[in-house]
Image (tube, helix red, strand yellow):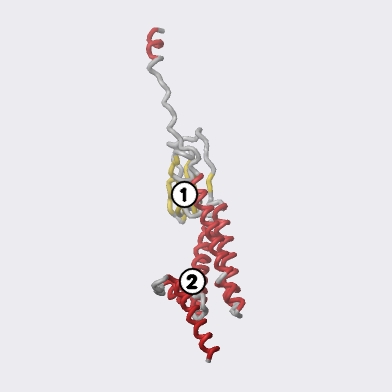
Amino acid sequence: MSLLKDAMPLMKETPPPPQVPFPWILPSLFAALNVVLLVIFSGYFFAFPCRWLAQNGEWAFPIITGPLFILTFFSLVSLNFSDPGILHQGSVEQDPMMVHVVWVNHRAFRLQWCQKCCFHRPPRTHHCPWCNICVEDFDHHCKWVNNCIGHRNFRFFMLLVLSLCLYSGAVLVTCIIFLLRTAHLPFSMNKASVYLHRPSGPYGEQGGGDRRGAGTDERRGLGGRS
């Protein structure tokens, strides 16, 4: 009994590792920010260049860019909330030393043991360190949507990549055509740059304007006298 009493003070429980509070907030906010930026920039696009072209008879641009925006927004939101192929965690009662072998295309594969999920994971299944889950047919973890890309949402990922490329190209072409169409207008980018770089008079812009006005009045007075 004395030996047990002497050994008791030496036995100390190891403290749990420190956990970062709410580690999922920043990645979730970053993914939500991407959706908000897509909506804001698309709103500016449809409010100014696309609307101007449509008012001047160029209806092909909103007809093409509108469905592409809807498809891009739908695939982005769907990929944020989709299931990548999560495999549920096993039980601690399972024996990690047990060997499990499966046959795929006449080839034998030994199932690897996942220490965090406590089960033998199938082939091409990997544990995501950011999501802390095992994903079937794991491809990668996409930080833009804060979700893993796996067996069940790979089609949404390819749809997002394709629709985003087409939508970005259509927006770029529309903006270039809008700048070319409005190059002759008084408030175009070329006229604005010339106005900003125009040298002012020795008395400033307001003084120069007053002098020009006075010269015009003098000419009108001389014309009236003659």
Q: Which residue is mark 1?
A: 125
Instruction: Please provide percent x and percent y for residue 20.
Output: 46, 37
Q: Is residue 16 above or below residue 37?
A: above
Query: Counting other residues with Cα less than 10 Å from the Cα at mark 2, is it few (<14), some (14-19), or many (20 or more)?
Result: few
Please state which amino acid type lies under the numbered disc 2: Leu
Callout 1 amino acid: Thr
Q: Is residue 93 above or below residue 121?
A: above
Q: Residue furthest front?
A: 225
| Element marked by disc 2 | helix
* Residue pictured at 51% horizontal, 53% vertical: 31
Nearest to viewer (mark 2 / mark 1): 2
In-front residue for pair 150/204: 204
Q: Is residue 92 left or right of residue 63?
A: left
Label 1 packing within 10 angstroms: few (<14), some (14-19), many (20+): many
Residue at mark 2: 172
Quarter occupied by residue 3: top left
Q: Can residue 155 be seen in the rendering of this structure?
A: no
Task: Report the quarter where the N terminus lies.
Answer: top left
